Image (cartoon, grey):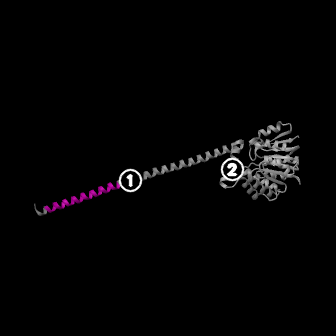
């Protein structure tokens, strides 16, 4: 074979090798591009799926939140309705649960919060504004065991009818009914009010002074059973024209009998007892309604600042 022929063969083999190399590069490039496209499609598909899952999760969370809100609103409405119409639920909620929560949160007592409301909203030296401030606070912000505005009108009516020169209140609490009674007393009349709890008495003194009625009122601290026998000697009282019972309900009957035994009731003395239905004073009602020494009448009303039935029992001592 001549040298020219050998040269042509070698050149042909080189051309075939380069062609095959170019073909391999093209094939490999096409394969890499195809793989990249598929990977991108998989990634986008995964992103869409994750997006749909997130949207679904958000919708579920929103619906769950709405369900909780609606459910809570229904529960609160049912509880509110029940509390407004059930005597024991009302007392449990207002006098124990809600009071304890506010005491814990504010680090103050209910009488102290009432005092602040009086100092903020009432006019000093004006008993009517003090009463209005307490009524507004207790009806719109926080319930309290005052005689209240509804039964307070009955108290006012009976007190005006009796026009006592000497009056006794058993159970001062924060001083609401004390102020309510004292403001209607004639000049020269005297009101003695008894409170067992020193903390309540401290607040009551400030509210009484704020109303400008401290000269008409004598506030005494201690158990009613210990103080009643000392009334004549300590205060020079012969008897009372009017007695308002609004302390421990199980003390209504024994303290009434004690007043009789100590000669502090005279013919015509009027006893007015609060909360005879809620929480109730069955032994006291049984006594005054069946005793020949009393003529009794029931005044139907509502538990202070609520729709729960309650009332006042007016009993006239016949001697």
| Image position of 307 (left or right of 317) | left
Query: Which residue is identified by label 1?
Result: 39
Query: Which residue is identified by label 2?
Result: 99
Tell which residue pokes out farthest to the left in this image: 1
Pinpoint residue 298: horizontal percent, then vertical percent: 82, 40
Q: Earlier in the sequence, mark 1 or mark 2?
A: 1
Residue at image position (17%, 61%) is 10
Report whether residue 184 is seen.
no
Say which element carries label 2: helix
Dot in front, 1 or 2? 2
Pinpoint residue 161: horizontal percent, then vertical percent: 88, 46
Report whether residue 296 is seen.
yes
Residue at image position (51%, 50%) is 55
- Which quadrant of the rendered structure holds the C terminus? top right
Please tell me whether the stretch drawn in magenta is mainly helix, strand or loop. helix
Please report the bounds of the magenta region as a residue range: 6-34
Dot 2: within a 10 Å radius of its alpha carbon, few (fewer than 14), some, or many (20 or more) residues? some
Q: Decide whether residue 293 is among the magenta residues.
A: no
Pinpoint residue 125: horizontal percent, then vertical percent: 82, 59
Residue at image position (82%, 37%) is 289
Q: CA distance from mark 1 to mark 2?
A: 65 Å
Pinpoint residue 197: horizontal percent, then vertical percent: 74, 51
């Amino acid at each position: 074979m001549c040298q020219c022929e050998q040269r042509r063969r070698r050149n042909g083999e080189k051309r075939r090798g380069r062609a095959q190399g170019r073909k391999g590069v093209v094939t490999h490039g096409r394969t890499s591009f195809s793989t990249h496209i598929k990977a991108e499609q998989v990634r986008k598909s995964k992103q869409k799926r994750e997006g749909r899952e997130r949207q679904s999760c958000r919708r579920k969370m929103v619906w769950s939140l709405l369900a909780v809100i609606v459910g809570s609103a229904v529960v609160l409405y049912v509880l509110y309705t029940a509390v407004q119409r059930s005597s024991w639920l009302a007392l449990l909620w207002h006098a124990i649960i809600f009071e304890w929560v506010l005491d814990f949160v504010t680090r103050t007592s209910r009488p102290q919060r009432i005092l602040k409301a009086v100092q903020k909203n009432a006019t000093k030296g004006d008993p009517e504004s003090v009463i209005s401030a307490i009524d507004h606070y207790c009806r719109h912000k926080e319930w309290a065991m005052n005689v209240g505005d509804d039964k307070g009108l009955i108290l006012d009516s009976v007190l005006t009818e009796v026009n006592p020169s000497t009056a006794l209140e058993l159970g001062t609490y924060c001083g609401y009914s004390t102020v309510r009674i004292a403001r209607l007393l004639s000049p020269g009349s005297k009101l003695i009010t008894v409170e067992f709890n020193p903390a309540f008495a401290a607040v009551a003194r400030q509210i009484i002074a704020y109303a400008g009625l401290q000269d008409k009122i004598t506030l005494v601290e201690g158990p009613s059973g210990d103080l009643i026998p000392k009334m004549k000697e300590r205060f020079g009282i012969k008897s009372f024209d009017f007695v308002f019972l609004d302390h421990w309900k199980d003390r209504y009957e024994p303290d009434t009998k004690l007043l009789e035994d100590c000669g502090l009731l005279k013919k015509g003395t009027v006893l007015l007892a609060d909360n005879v239905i809620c929480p109730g004073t069955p032994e006291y009602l049984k006594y005054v309604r069946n005793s020949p020494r009393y003529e009794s009448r029931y005044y139907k009303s509502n538990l202070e600042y609520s729709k729960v039935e309650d009332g006042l029992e007016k009993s006239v001592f016949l001697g």
